[in-house]
Amino acid sequence: MLPNVLQPSATDHVPVLAAEVRESLAVRPGQTVVDATFGAGGHAALLAADLQGRGKLIAIDRDPTVRTYFERLEKRSGVQARLLRGDFSVVLPQLAANGVQADAILLDLGVSSMQLDRPDRGFSYSVDAPLDMRMDTSQDLTASAIVNEWPERELVTIFRRYGEERYARQIGRAILRRRGEQPFERTGELVDTIKGAIPAPARFGEGHPAKRVFQALRIAVNDELGSLETALPAALEMLRPGGRLAVIAFHSLEDRIVKHRLRGLPGLSVLTKKPVVPSLLEVRRNPRARSARLRAAERLSEASIQAGSAPARAR
Ligand SMILES: C[S@@+](CC[C@H](N)C(=O)[O-])C[C@H]1O[C@@H](n2cnc3c(N)ncnc32)[C@H](O)[C@@H]1O
């Protein structure tokens, strides 16, 4: 049983696939754990508990507001902990270049519940807010810069590629028309423009009509796919032989990158043939877990590479 302070309720966030992440990473006392997407520290608290007071936790996040959660966890966990603020695609290669080694690395991708629920961050299509969507609030590029300044062709491309939006062309055209009259400042203005651009039946179809465009903008603002592509090889480089990497993706574009990268990286044994998905019970309790897909891999030791043997699936 975990001490109470380390239960997920110690944060405001319910970690997704928590038991499955713990099982995949199989953290033991004395190890070094890297949580590259610290957020509210929900997973980090559980992994720190597995260190049982002996070991190191390196937390990374590009959002400066996670510091409060980190300070709380640092006090309670009893392990040596450090917070590195920055994009994991920059921080992980820096750590690897400095010879830092890890036994377990977690990437729980996308935005956190706190980011989604804070209206002023502009991630949500259901609340009117400034059109921002930056995870790192010191970054220059915002959703409003993309919507007001990018050429129509590029808008259509990201809506199609990152949002799989059927009406990308119509929405792109409507955005150009509207911004010619008045620049976009708020999420509500964009939602209205999207609603006006798509055929009436589609407005009442599957999900919110602005969902896919908002997803596309968020991915573009934060260069989410580019960061993931760069981070995965660096994470592998940091893993000690026998060390494990777990990645939770929330949409098919991310999951495809994780699947191909894990298969394509030498010296790595994939532990999850198929992605691990949340149980019906978890989805009922936490609907945001619905699209989560967990994949995990273990770095092989030189001996097992030479012997051509696969690692044990569970420790
Ligand atoms: C889904 S939340 C993680 C929640 C966390 N596992 C927990 O249990 O509280 C994702 C977090 O990763 C951060 N993040 C996303 N992409 C990042 C990147 N490229 N570099 C650093 N942090 C990133 C976000 O700012 C957010 O806080």
Image (cartoon, rainbow, N blue to C red):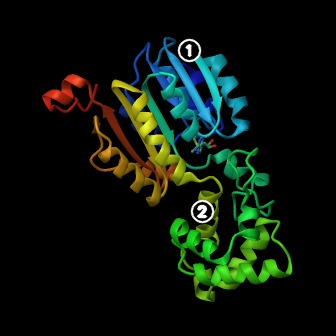
Query: What type is the residue that disc 1 sits on?
Result: Val
Q: Residue furthest right?
A: 182
Asked if residue 300 is positioned above or below residue 126 in the image, the reply reads above
Percent across and percent down for residue 269 are: 27, 37
Please name the residue that numbered disc 1 is placed on: 79
Quadrant observed for ligand 1 in the rendered image: top right
Q: Nearer the viewer, residue 254 or 100?
A: 100
Horizontal side of residue 274 vs 42, given as left or right: left
Asked if residue 119 is positioned above or below residue 299 in the image, the reply reads below
Asked if residue 167 is positioned above or below residue 76 in the image, the reply reads below
Q: Nearer the viewer, residue 62 or 204?
A: 62
Could you tell me which residue is drawn at 28 percent across and 25 percent down?
315
Percent across and percent down for residue 304 are: 19, 26
Please name the residue that numbered disc 2 is placed on: 215
- The answer to whether residue 1 of the structure is visible from this angle is no
Q: Which class describes the residues within 10 Å of circle 2: few (<14), some (14-19), or many (20+)?
A: many
